[in-house]
Amino acid sequence: MTQAVVSELDERVPGRRWTVRLDPADRSGTAVRVSCSRPACAEQRLPAAAAGRAAAVAHLKAHLRAAPAPRPGVYCACRADGCQAHQPAAGRPARAEPWRCGGAIVLAVLADREGRWWQVLECCARCAAATPGARAVGQAPGPRTAARPAPAATGAPQFSDHQAAAPDPVPSSRPSRVRHRRPLPKIAQRVIPYDLRPLTLRDELVELGDLFRSYQQRDEPDLALLADLHSRKATAFVAWADATGDTRLRLEAERAEQAAAAALVQHQHRTGSAIGDGPAVARLLSAPAQWEHARTVLAHVADNAPLPGAEARLLVLMLTLRTAHTGTGNLVGQDLAMLGLTDPGELVEQLTGCGWLGLSGTVADLLASRPENATPITVPSLAPRDGERPFTFGRKMRPKLSGWAQRVVSEKKLRKSKATAGTRLFALTLASRTDASGRLGPEGRGIALDTLTAHVPVDPEELQHATERLTATDWLTDAVLTDTHLTGHLSERVLPLTCPFGPSRS
């Protein structure tokens, strides 16, 4: 009997063991090499570690599909002298008795935590269970008993009768992430309470929060959509304030209403869609920021012009727009000829004489210059000092503002009627002080007379004459000049040249 048992043990073969490795393909690049210890498997080369890791795992799974269970009649391949289960743990005394293998033979899979190798071996259930990170993916067939049913041949890894099956036979080479609780829903950095009632209000707030976060991920802005979101937010925050009595929510609702109005105006101005009852307009300066910059330049020239008179004021304005960013620019004779000045050479002489303007040549050279040989000019008062400039707009904004002013003062009907410099400066001032529909003044209430005379230095008679000239050239309609205000409406044909005030400006 004993000889039969020994003979049976001698006939058992050692369990198989094979390893899939991921190694650098060369020292200088990112390519990797995937190799398998099985003789029939060819080596693979991949361009990066991520692709190599995926290929290694796929190769290992192919082996497991081809051999889903250990062979019957094999003994543990752990080789007791190198098995982790047979070695004493660090800091613990050696075992009094050697570890003994036991249990059914299983197909176990181990993986390096750094993702450098994966190993499959046929070993006993005790060694597999005692090896950290090992997973059993199959068990050798054996006799069934009522108390010990046979496990499944594939899939369901089991280290004992009571352990649950793992869904993936190949263990991950990296530690699993800790699952966190889903964050509380928010809108505008405010947590939306779970017990907020009515539920329709809470659902609206949660949806709005998600929509605002989604909008921030857009590649291109949609101002119409943004205006609608702010409008919904304002309504929802008012209802939230009523439900909780929090006055801060009502203030947030007011800010949302203002943001909705601003976004809608910007959308309408950019797309040329109708604003209120006004016509659709595609303006030369399309953004509210550009309109404010234009008014800033006009106000600066009104306060800092070095010479009196409407002609000098118009010339100073155009030169300021040419040199606004750095204090330097280029000028040609045609730029002066289009302004309707009585004696442009004399005005340039006066500006250079008082030190406001600097030329690289003579005034005669400036008047004779052409685009191919433009005259460099400087305005020292506009040069940056200590890193600060008199205007806040950037380098790309300056030519837009200068082009807008040139389009206004050289407008076709003004040029054909040989309008004076005062009339052209008057037209430029009116174009910068309308509402969205072209009515003069903020919200169409008209322009105060002292504001007009501050920008256009003429007496009341000349102002009346300029008003009549603009009416005759189809610039103005329904114009009424009183002792305090000028009211009226710019004609539809010049609306693209206007710079309207915002809807809330007083």
Image (cartoon, rainbow, N blue to C red):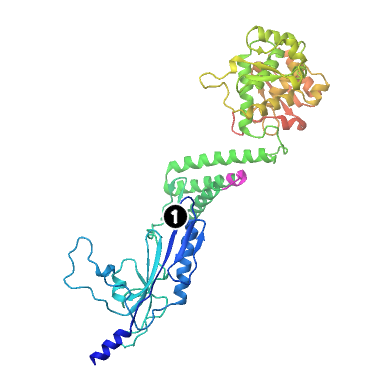
49 horizontally vs 506: left or right: left
Residue drawn at (59%, 44%) of the image: 227
Is residue 224 inside the magenta stretch?
yes
The residue pinned by badge 1 equals 197
Crowding at mark 1 (Cα within 10 Å: few <14, some 14-19, many 20+): few
Foreground pick, 494 / 25: 25
Of the pair 438 and 349, the residue shown nearer to us:
349
Report if residue 439 is visible in the image. yes
Amino acid residing under circle 1: Arg
> Quick one: which residue is furthest to the bottom in this view?
1
Where does the image place residue 311, in percent across and percent down from the top left? 72, 13
Q: Is residue 484 visible?
A: no
Q: Quadrant of residue 127?
A: bottom left
Q: How many marks?
A: 1
**190 left or right, relative to 445:** left
User: Which residue corresponds to the image point at 73% horizontal and 16% vertical from the top-left?
Assistant: 463
- Taking the magenta stretch, the answer to whether it contains residue 382 is no
Q: Residue at x 48, y 67 (%)?
A: 58
User: In the picture, residue 70 is in which quadrant?
Assistant: bottom left
Q: Residue shown at 47%/42% (left/top)? A: 250
Q: Residue pushed farthest left?
A: 96
Residue 469 is situated, as x and y percent measured from the top left of the image, at: 79, 20
Residue 99, picture quadrant: bottom left
Q: Which residues are magenta?
A: 218-226
Determine whether 469 is above or below 8 in the image. above
